[in-house]
Image (cartoon, helix red, strand yellow):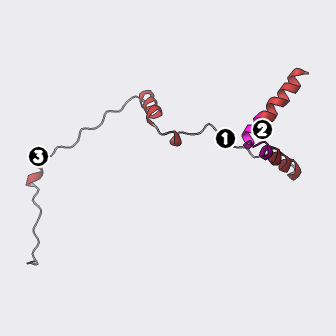
Amino acid sequence: MMTGERKGLSFDNLDDFQPRPKPTVAPAATKKAVDKTASFPSREQPDDAQINIKAATATLDRFRALAKAERYRHGEFLDILMDAYEGRVGGS
Protein backbone atom coordinates (compact mmCIF):
# COMPACT_ATOMS: atom_id res chain seq x y z
CA MET A 1 0.00 0.00 0.00
CA MET A 2 1.48 3.34 -0.99
CA THR A 3 1.00 6.52 0.91
CA GLY A 4 1.48 10.03 -0.37
CA GLU A 5 4.09 10.79 2.28
CA ARG A 6 7.77 11.05 1.43
CA LYS A 7 10.48 10.16 3.87
CA GLY A 8 13.68 12.15 4.04
CA LEU A 9 17.04 10.46 3.58
CA SER A 10 19.06 9.77 6.68
CA PHE A 11 22.66 10.83 6.17
CA ASP A 12 23.72 9.59 9.62
CA ASN A 13 24.74 6.23 8.14
CA LEU A 14 27.21 7.88 5.76
CA ASP A 15 29.62 8.98 8.51
CA ASP A 16 31.68 5.79 8.03
CA PHE A 17 32.70 6.78 4.51
CA GLN A 18 35.92 8.68 3.89
CA PRO A 19 36.96 10.40 0.67
CA ARG A 20 39.38 8.47 -1.48
CA PRO A 21 43.00 9.57 -1.23
CA LYS A 22 44.21 11.60 -4.17
CA PRO A 23 46.31 9.51 -6.55
CA THR A 24 49.98 10.34 -6.64
CA VAL A 25 51.13 11.92 -9.86
CA ALA A 26 53.86 9.93 -11.61
CA PRO A 27 56.71 11.79 -13.31
CA ALA A 28 56.02 12.46 -16.97
CA ALA A 29 58.78 10.13 -18.18
CA THR A 30 57.46 7.24 -16.08
CA LYS A 31 53.91 7.86 -17.21
CA LYS A 32 54.96 7.99 -20.85
CA ALA A 33 56.92 4.73 -20.55
CA VAL A 34 54.00 2.97 -18.88
CA ASP A 35 51.55 4.32 -21.44
CA LYS A 36 53.77 3.14 -24.28
CA THR A 37 54.05 -0.43 -22.98
CA ALA A 38 50.46 -0.68 -21.79
CA SER A 39 48.77 0.90 -24.80
CA PHE A 40 46.97 -0.87 -27.57
CA PRO A 41 48.83 -0.84 -30.91
CA SER A 42 45.71 0.44 -32.63
CA ARG A 43 45.75 3.50 -30.38
CA GLU A 44 49.37 4.44 -30.98
CA GLN A 45 50.00 7.34 -33.27
CA PRO A 46 51.12 6.11 -36.65
CA ASP A 47 54.47 7.15 -38.02
CA ASP A 48 52.76 8.25 -41.20
CA ALA A 49 52.22 11.63 -42.76
CA GLN A 50 50.44 12.83 -45.84
CA ILE A 51 51.37 15.12 -48.71
CA ASN A 52 49.45 16.58 -51.59
CA ILE A 53 51.16 16.43 -54.98
CA LYS A 54 49.99 18.66 -57.77
CA ALA A 55 50.86 17.19 -61.15
CA ALA A 56 49.34 16.55 -64.54
CA THR A 57 46.43 14.11 -64.45
CA ALA A 58 48.25 11.81 -66.86
CA THR A 59 51.30 11.68 -64.53
CA LEU A 60 49.20 10.89 -61.47
CA ASP A 61 47.20 8.27 -63.39
CA ARG A 62 50.45 6.68 -64.55
CA PHE A 63 51.83 6.64 -60.98
CA ARG A 64 48.62 5.07 -59.63
CA ALA A 65 48.55 2.48 -62.42
CA LEU A 66 52.19 1.48 -61.87
CA ALA A 67 51.71 1.19 -58.11
CA LYS A 68 48.55 -0.86 -58.58
CA ALA A 69 50.16 -3.15 -61.16
CA GLU A 70 53.00 -3.92 -58.74
CA ARG A 71 50.59 -4.12 -55.77
CA TYR A 72 52.27 -1.37 -53.77
CA ARG A 73 50.68 1.29 -51.65
CA HIS A 74 51.48 4.76 -52.95
CA GLY A 75 53.95 5.53 -50.13
CA GLU A 76 55.83 2.26 -50.64
CA PHE A 77 56.00 2.83 -54.39
CA LEU A 78 57.28 6.37 -53.83
CA ASP A 79 60.07 4.93 -51.64
CA ILE A 80 61.07 2.54 -54.43
CA LEU A 81 61.11 5.31 -57.01
CA MET A 82 63.18 7.62 -54.77
CA ASP A 83 65.65 4.82 -54.00
CA ALA A 84 66.05 4.12 -57.71
CA TYR A 85 66.52 7.82 -58.44
CA GLU A 86 69.13 8.24 -55.70
CA GLY A 87 70.97 5.15 -56.94
CA ARG A 88 71.03 6.54 -60.46
CA VAL A 89 72.10 10.04 -59.40
CA GLY A 90 74.59 8.82 -56.76
CA GLY A 91 76.06 6.19 -59.10
CA SER A 92 76.75 8.64 -61.90
Is 75 colored magenta in this rendering?
Answer: yes
Mark 3 lies on a secondary structure that is helix
Mark 2 lies on a secondary structure that is helix
Crowd tier of the residue under label 3, counting other residues whose Cα lies within 10 Å: few below 14, some 14–19, many 20 or above: few
Residue at position x 79%, y 44% from top?
A: 67
Task: Identify the residue position indicated by label 2 in the image.
Answer: 78
Residue 16 - label: 3
* Circle count: 3
What residue type is disc 2 on?
Answer: Leu
Quarter of the figure that contains the N terminus? bottom left
Residue 28, how many percent across, how many down? 43, 30
Q: Quadrant of residue 9?
A: bottom left
Mark 1 lies on a secondary structure that is loop
Residue 27, how many percent across, how many down? 40, 28
Instruction: Tell me the chief SS of the magenta region.
Output: helix
Relative to residue 74, is residue 60 drawn left or right?
Answer: right
Residue furthest right as drawn: 92
Residue 86, how many percent across, how many down? 83, 27
What residue type is disc 1 on?
Answer: Ala
Disc 1 from disc 3: Cα separation: 55 Å
Which stretch appears magenta?
Answer: 67-79
Is 7 colored magenta in this rendering?
Answer: no
